[in-house]
Structures are given as C-alpha cells and as structure tokens.
Image (cartoon, rainbow, N blue to C red):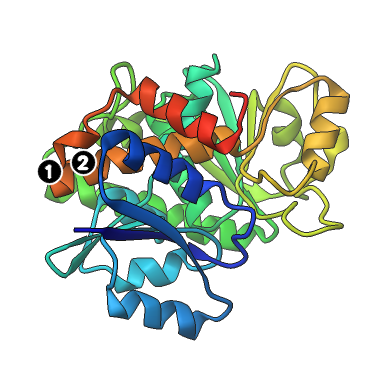
Amino acid sequence: MTEHLYILGHPITHSKSPVMYNAVYERAGLPWHYGTADLATRAEAEAFLAARDFLSINITTPYKPEAFAAADVRAASASLAHGANVLVNKGGALIAYNTDGQGCVAYLEGAGVSFAGKSVVVCGTGPTALSILHAVAQAGPADVLLLGRDKERAHRVMRTYADELGAMIGRTVDMPAFKEGHLSFAEVYKRVDFRFGSYDTSRQAIAGADIIIDATPLGMNEGDGAPFDVALLRADQTVFDVVYGHGETALAAAARATGCTFFDGAGMLVGQAVVTVGILRDITETAALDIPEDELFAIMADAAGFDL
C-alpha cells in the first residue's frame, strides 16, 4: 500500500526534502511517496492539515504554528518550540515533533563544532529558533542568548520557554539527553545561563560570542540584510545560517569575508531529516527504516547534491 508523505510550506520550490526522503524510501524498499504541498494561504494549509490524508508531513515556513495547533499529541520538542516541523499520523491522531534543533546541533557537532562551555547567540524568536535554543542548551554551553528585533518580545519568549521547561521537569521524571555528554532537561534548567536581548542592545554580546546561529528567515528574499551589524563579527567565531538554497545570504557573505567558520542550513536540513526518519521508524514500527544514522545522512545528502 502506497503511503503519502509531504513537505508543507510556502514557498518550497527550492526544497530538497522530496529527493532526500524518496531516496531513503527507495533504499528501504518501501512503497512510500514524498511530495510537496506548496500552499499559499493559511486557510489552505489548515484545510490540508484537517484532512489528515497523509502518513507524515514535514512543515516549513510559515506553517509550523498551524501544524502545532492541529496536533493531538505534542512531544516536548514541539511544545517548547511552540511549533511543529513534523507531524506523524498514527491511527488518525497527529503527533507533533520539532526536529530542527536536534538536527542543527547534530550536524554542527559532526562537523567539529563543540558547544560545551561556549557562549552562544541564537537569532530569532520563532519555533525554529526555540527548537535550536533548546538543543543548543542540551549540548552544554555556558550561556545562550536569544536575540530578536524587539527586546521585550525576546524577553517574553525566553521567559515562556524557561517556565515551560521548569513545568515539564516538575511534573515528570527527568527527560534524558539525546546524546551521551549532553544535558538532561533538569540539568539544562539548572546549569545553563539563559539571556535575552535585541540586536541593537546586545552588540557587545554578539561580538563576544563563540557561536552565532541565525534562525531567522532573512536571506530567503532578495535584498534581505543580516539580522545584526555584521561589523561585530570576529574571525574566530563560528556562524551558522539556517537558510540554504537562496544564494549567498548577507550574513554568509560577511562571515566568510571576516574569516569566520561558516555553515549554511543544508546540513541542518539533512540532520533533522535523519531524526525524522528515526521517528517514523519508531512510530510506524517499520523495520526497513532501521538504517544507521551515518548511512541515512549520506544517502540524503547525496540525493540533495550537498557536499557535506
């Protein structure tokens, strides 16, 4: 029986997800087909979600909040991010996850980036930024600074994240880290120094950070600038931009010109896809998807034409 899976968002003509996932399903010998749901309006997206005519979907900008709202069950990763980038249909019930952060951190660590004891800046206040914020925190940094255009909004978003993380810890047994050497939820809450600010008020923190992650959509449209003053960059910083496939972003150009170690969002895309395949394997109990993570990463990166 053919199962249908999709990527939902707008615009998604640049997306490599279909070729990546279809390569995995072909490798596993599964009669699954992954297509696109490029829907221009929120109403269309909500109708698509309500129909539930899919085994699973990945969700990208701008419909992660709508996917979160449509879910019947939400994993901690989605709840803390207030947005879902994965929905799995299990017997008619939609289970929500957010794999952006785990995929981002896994890719960067695989590329040799260490977060332990570091000072990290995360730009953005949406679901992608929050997912990355939490995954970064689990990787053991000294501090994480969440930045947005508006300081008060960044404060509200950070306060909500911290309160919800604390509530999760208070009502359940401690949730262990995904990876050896990372922190559990309770350890994140106790050990990591969470801060907030705006791009204008946190210039010194940006300049002093070890790792800067831009989790905003800036760069997807022609003429987009960087989220902050790129003159603050230093050559010994690591800079990551979630955007890929739209040409060189303003942040990418500045980071490379400064001599920073720079990564774009292609590796994160593959990294979160590896996590998604693992979720599908576990939820659907499909043994054919029991493929080692490094092999999955290679299959999908090759299908997408990424040199990672």
The residue wearing badge 2 is 281
Residue type highlighted by circle 2: Arg
Q: At 34% from the left edge and 72% from the top edge, which residue is drawn?
A: 69
Q: Nearer the viewer, residue 294 or 173?
A: 294
Kindly identify the amino acid type of the residue bearing the numbered disc 1. Glu
Quarter occupied by the C terminus:
top right
Q: Nearer the viewer, residue 107 or 122?
A: 107
Secondary structure beneath dot 1 equals loop
Could you tell me which secondary element the residue under label 2 belongs to?
helix
Residue 231: percent from the left, percent from the top? 88, 35
Point 48% across, 25% down: residue:
141
Give the answer, above or below, for where 96 lies relative to 255: below
Q: Is residue 210 left or right of residue 200?
A: left
Q: Is residue 232 visible?
A: no
Image quadrant in which you'd find residue 241: top right
Mark 1 touches mark 2? (CB < 8 Å): yes
